[in-house]
């Protein structure tokens, strides 16, 4: 159990014993060191409800509060806050436990089947900057949820279906006849443009493309095989990006829109039988009173077009049926651009009404903002095109390489390349994860690659510094006791024990920036400790204890960055 939870339970018990059962304890880390380590702020609310004096109630709660072996001092502050100073021996014990355990002493959550759907690119186009955030955030959520023991299922809901695939397959066949399609497909955007050009200019080609669409939809084996070939080739491009970016996604996670094709007529029928469909100008529509448009009319969720075609929404309903029926999910996180927020609200509402999303299944849209240029508009190339992801990643690595080379010219070339990979990709990921995912942010190479401030290079460097201290201490005894005496030791140690709290917070609210702020705080507190408390110059028990604190810091930084998908280095 996390310390915050432990204190919270104890304060709640004392509140109940003092005549305020059920009153929330409101326990949080203290905002300033002079307020102790944790504060319980629930007394004021409880006193208000009981119409009693808050300070008197606080005194009563403290008298009844059992924090034996946990806190060394508990005091009232202000109108009725309770300040809790943790017992140094208790903190030391928690840090020792974290050091001795592979998962840093972190408790496992009650395991749920959690899906993280992310990346979900449209296969007809090359991956661009718009795919960066979802990939980075989704991957961090996969790692965090797995770490605390959930059964995590990754899904890549790629757009692999629709009329444009007739055209693309026709063009693939044409280029294959002429030479090597794999080469042509290396640049998907050009491939797409050229096939569109052929479609617009050549009647025979356009007819063939249309014929392919019909055949695809009716399940013609030959055309399906060609389409599969195209899908496979485009996925090769995605996989190369996932690898470069260090994402966990692979072919096994791909379940494209096409997968739900057979279920679409079935589910539309079911909606009709359930009385949820209305025909509107030939289209089949679910009207949702919950979402009114500007005119005050219920919003329309269209599931079948006039003429019979199905849509993005229909496929997503099919995906929900599969995710509940076959994947048996307890929780689903859809990491998708915030601009699709209305779609997901309508989707989940429709699915609930149809009875496809049972009580207790938590389906959430994990929306994210857009990456902006310095002008505050979505970042584009100079000529106004989408920035290709592969080029952006290469630039990050190249910039990191220049940086490392200028700082550390004597390192062998291969090592500098290796560091550049970790620092460049790490910087890109961290810049994204350290901001609240809901907001847009302005892309800034210099800021993200800085060795100062809340950045990946700063944290990666902090890690190597700690490791180098540990390497220098040849007598380091990894089984030594931790003794917390100095203020700087205590602050660092308390922060180290809060790793568990923050990991659970991130899993709960899907906001990785809390983990970033936490790691930055740990690194900052380590610097302070390092300055205030000599490690290598101290002796005996004190030296061993401080080395242990350093080791716990390194372990926490490495694990925390690992949860964000960021690698650490032993030297840089
Ligand atoms: N392929 C879609 C797009 O590029 C995103 C899919 C998001 N996921 C979903 N289940 N709708 O806009």
Image (cartoon, rainbow, N blue to C red):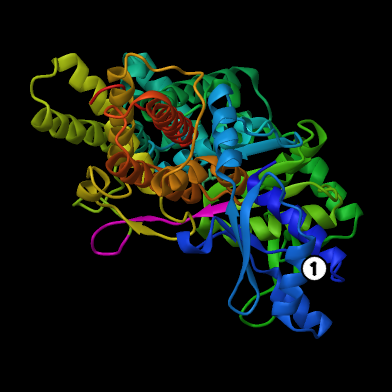
Which of the pair 2/256 is nearer the observer? 2
Residue 537: image x %, image y %? Answer: 26, 29
Residue 302 as seen in the image, left or right of residue 198: right
The kind of secondary structure element at disc 1 is: loop
Which residue is at a point 66% across and 46% down the rendered structure image?
A: 70
Which quadrant would the C terminus be assigned to in this image?
A: top left
Q: Nearer the viewer, residue 155 or 164?
A: 155
Is disc 1 surrounded by few (<14), some (14 to 19) or many (20+) residues within 10 Å?
Answer: some
Which stretch did the figure color magenta?
A: 366-377
Q: Tell which quarter ligand 1 is in.
A: top right
In this orientation, which residue lies closer to the viewer: 527 or 403?
527
**Which residue lies at the image location 46% right of the left edge and 50% below the top edge?**
513
In the picture, measured across the screen, residue 187 lies left or right of residue 232, that is left
**Camera-side residue: 453 or 498?**
498
Q: Residue at x 70, y 33 (%)?
A: 108
Q: Is residue 436 above or below residue 77?
A: above
Residue 117 coordinates in the image, percent (x, y): 60, 39
Q: Is residue 133 visible to us here?
A: no
Residue 392 appearing in the image: yes
Q: Is residue 186 magenta?
A: no
Task: Inspect the magenta stretch and tell me whether residue 374 lies in it.
Answer: yes
Q: Give above or below for 11 relative to 105.
A: below
Q: Quadrant of residue 256?
A: top right
> Which residue is denoted by mark 1 in the rendering?
23
């Amino acid at each position: 159990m996390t310390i915050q939870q432990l204190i919270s339970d104890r304060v709640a018990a004392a509140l109940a014993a003092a005549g305020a059962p059920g009153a929330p304890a409101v326990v949080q880390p203290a905002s300033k060191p002079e307020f102790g380590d944790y504060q319980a702020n629930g007394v004021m609310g409880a006193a208000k409800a009981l119409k009693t004096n808050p300070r008197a109630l606080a005194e009563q709660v403290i008298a009844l509060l059992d924090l034996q072996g946990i806190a060394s001092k508990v005091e009232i502050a202000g109108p009725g806050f309770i300040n809790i100073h943790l017992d140094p021996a208790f903190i030391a014990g928690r840090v020792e436990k974290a050091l001795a355990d592979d998962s840093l002493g972190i408790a496992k959550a009650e395991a749920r089947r959690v899906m993280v759907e992310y990346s979900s690119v449209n296969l007809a186009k090359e991956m661009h900057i718009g795919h960066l955030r979802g990939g980075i955030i989704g991957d961090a959520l996969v790692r965090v949820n797995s770490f605390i023991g959930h059964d995590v299922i990754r899904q890549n809901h790629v757009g692999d279906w629709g009329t444009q695939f007739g055209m693309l397959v026709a063009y693939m066949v044409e280029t294959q006849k002429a030479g090597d399609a794999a080469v042509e497909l290396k640049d998907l955007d050009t491939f797409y443009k050229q096939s569109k050009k052929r479609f617009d200019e050549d009647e025979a080609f356009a007819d063939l493309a249309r014929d392919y669409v019909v055949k695809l939809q009716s399940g013609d084996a030959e055309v399906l095989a060609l389409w599969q070939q195209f899908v496979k080739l485009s996925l090769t491009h995605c996989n190369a990006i996932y690898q470069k970016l260090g994402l966990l996604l692979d072919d096994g996670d791909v379940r494209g829109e096409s997968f739900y094709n057979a279920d679409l007529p079935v589910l539309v029928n079911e909606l009709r039988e359930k009385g949820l469909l209305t025909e509107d100008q030939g289209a089949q529509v679910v009207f949702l009173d919950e979402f009114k448009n500007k005119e005050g009319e219920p919003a329309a969720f269209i599931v079948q077009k006039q003429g019979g075609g199905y849509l993005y929404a229909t496929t997503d309903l099919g995906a929900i049926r599969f995710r509940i029926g076959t994947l048996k999910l307890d929780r689903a996180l859809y990491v998708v651009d915030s601009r699709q927020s209305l779609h997901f609200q309508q989707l989940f509402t429709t699915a609930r009404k149809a009875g496809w999303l049972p009580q207790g299944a938590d389906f959430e849209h994990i929306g994210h903002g857009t990456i902006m240029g310095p002008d505050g508009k979505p970042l584009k190339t100079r000529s106004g095109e989408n920035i290709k992801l592969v080029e952006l990643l290469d630039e990050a690595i190249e910039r990191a390489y220049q940086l490392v080379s200028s700082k550390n010219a004597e390192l062998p070339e291969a090592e500098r390349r290796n560091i550049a990979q970790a620092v460049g990709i790490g910087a890109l990921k961290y810049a994204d994860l350290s901001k609240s995912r809901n907001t847009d942010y302005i892309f800034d190479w210099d800021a993200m690659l800085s060795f100062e401030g809340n950045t990946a290079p700063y944290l990666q460097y902090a890690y190597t510094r700690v490791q180098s201290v540990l390497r220098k201490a040849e007598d380091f005894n990894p089984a030594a006791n931790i003794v917390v005496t100095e203020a700087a030791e205590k602050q660092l140690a308390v922060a180290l024990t809060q790793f568990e709290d923050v990991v659970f917070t991130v899993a709960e609210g899907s906001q990785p920036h809390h983990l970033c702020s936490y790691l930055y705080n740990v690194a900052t507190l380590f610097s302070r400790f390092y300055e205030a408390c000599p490690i290598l110059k101290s002796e005996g028990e004190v030296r061993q204890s401080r080395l242990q604190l350093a080791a716990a810091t390194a372990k926490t930084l490495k694990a925390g960055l690992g949860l964000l998908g960021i690698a650490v280095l032993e030297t840089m």
